[in-house]
Image: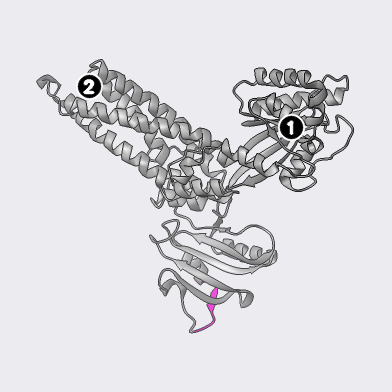
Amino acid sequence: MIYNDTIVALATASGAGAVAIIRLSGKDAIAIADGCFESVKNNKSLVKQNTHTIHLGHIVEDKRTLDQVLVSVFKNPNSYTGEDVVEVSCHGSIYIQQEIIQLFLRKGCRMANPGEFTLRAFLNGKLDLSQAEAVADVIASDNEASHQIAMQQMRGGFSSEIAKLREELMNFASLIELELDFAEEDVEFADRSQFKALVTRISFVLKRLIDSFAVGNVIKNGIPVAIVGEPNVGKSTLLNALLNEERAIVSDIAGTTRDTIEDELVIEGIGFRFIDTAGIRDTKDVVESIGIKKTFEKIEQAQVVVLLFSAEEFKEESQRLKVEIEKIKNRFPLKPMLIIANKIDKLNDAEKLVLTSQFESIHMLSAKTGIGVDTLKEKLIGFVNTGALRNNETIVTNTRHYDSLLKASEEIEKVKHGLETGLSGDLLAIDIRQALYHFGEITGEITSDDLLGNIFANFCIGK
């Protein structure tokens, strides 16, 4: 893929604001900007200015001044895209933005495609593919944890780990390939014991990266938490207490919530997506039945289930409530579950002791008064393995990377098996090449136009 033209796009968010930035990149970027720019002092030419300099002046067309601007000049190869880049900081009027962009289009630019600035950075060797994808993740990050992971990947933490594994495997692959050239002499250039140790280590690292996806994916997308239970036990009140706002309708009428209600909350830098569901009970109401069906669908999708019941009702109907709890546990045995007794403000100390004796692990709170809500948040954080974040370990969040790691791991296992069974060098080489191929897919040594198109189509246009 070769891009020789000059592109332009709005780099800041669309809409009116105090300031907007219009970005140009390409071989004619500085010349095109220079033809529309009049400096405030000394009639300076942008083409003659040093890289990484800023200049005050006006954007003009046929002696008509469009705006007073600051123009930043970045000369290749020391720019974001590796090409000549100009950034025009203008006033944030939508009219001014469009007038300046249309002027640059008339002077020879074309509108950038989504993600084309970052695509050019990749094609010009300023970023590898996983770093380029991390740019979009940084922009989309909405909590501390997802931001930390994206920044680590953009700085090349994941890339360097993969590149190191690929390089070591490549060195042994070269020796294996060399052996094939001397097949008649029956010599071994690659020390099989060292190679076996390397393959074992690569297999261990790949497994760690693959396992990290379980944590990374939920951190990136938010951890879905389903709040479930019978009608009128306080599910909507709990959602409102967690969010600290009246998000869900609360009523004494059982079955008020007919559909699922979702909202997000960041707890200690981790994003949680809480889902208030319809109460689970036998009902002939058609609409409520649909809501209950959706409840079980949301439990299936959730990473954590918060099972709520009324502490008041437990005194009279403890056995029935236990049966309902077991029913959900049996249907979703692998789901982490928090069993919560709500409305404990209506119990005395003796009744609380009776309640806790009925379960191995139970959390008591009052959604109405807020008692125990902060402790619930701490318990939810406990379900997330943030140790890797604290230790600054590499965490995989990208589904494409996860898929390539799985395929690479399969090939490495084949290589390991081949070494253990004394497989010939030519057959070992096939599996090694495939493993190297999947490593290359992650960092971009191996790409296709379709792959790049799919990746960068998800970017915003100005990036």
Specify whether 81 is left or right of 88.
left
Identity of the residue furthest to the front in this view: 350
Residue at horizontal 60 percent and vertical 59 percent from the top: 12
Mark 2: few, some, or many residues within 10 Å (few <14, many ≥20)? many
Q: Quadrant of residue 1?
A: top left
Tell me which amino acid carries mark 1. Lys
102 falls in the magenta region: no
Residue indicated by mark 1: 352
Q: Is residue 240 above or below residue 294?
A: below
37 falls in the magenta region: yes
Pinpoint residue 137: horizontal percent, then vertical percent.
54, 46
Q: Nearer the viewer, mark 2 or mark 1?
A: 1
Tell me which amino acid carries mark 2. Gly
Residue at horizontal 45 percent and vertical 31 percent from the top: 210
Of the pair 436 and 380, the residue shown nearer to us: 380
Q: Is residue 34 above or below residue 292?
A: below
Q: Quadrant of residue 191?
A: top left
Residue at horizontal 72 percent and vertical 24 percent from the top: 296
Mark 2 / mark 1, whichever is N-terminal: 1
Secondary element at image label 1? helix
Secondary element at image label 2? helix
Residue 268 — which label? none
Asked whether the viewer can see residue 36, the reply is no
Residue indicated by mark 2: 425
Q: Which residues are magenta?
A: 35-41
Pinpoint residue 200: horizontal percent, then vertical percent.
31, 28
The colouring scheme, among rainbow, by chain, secondary structure or one colour, is one colour
Specify whether 376 is left or right of 311.
left
Mark 1: few, some, or many residues within 10 Å (few <14, many ≥20)? some
Residue at horizontal 29 percent and vertical 38 percent from the top: 167
Specify whether 166 is left or right of 134.
left
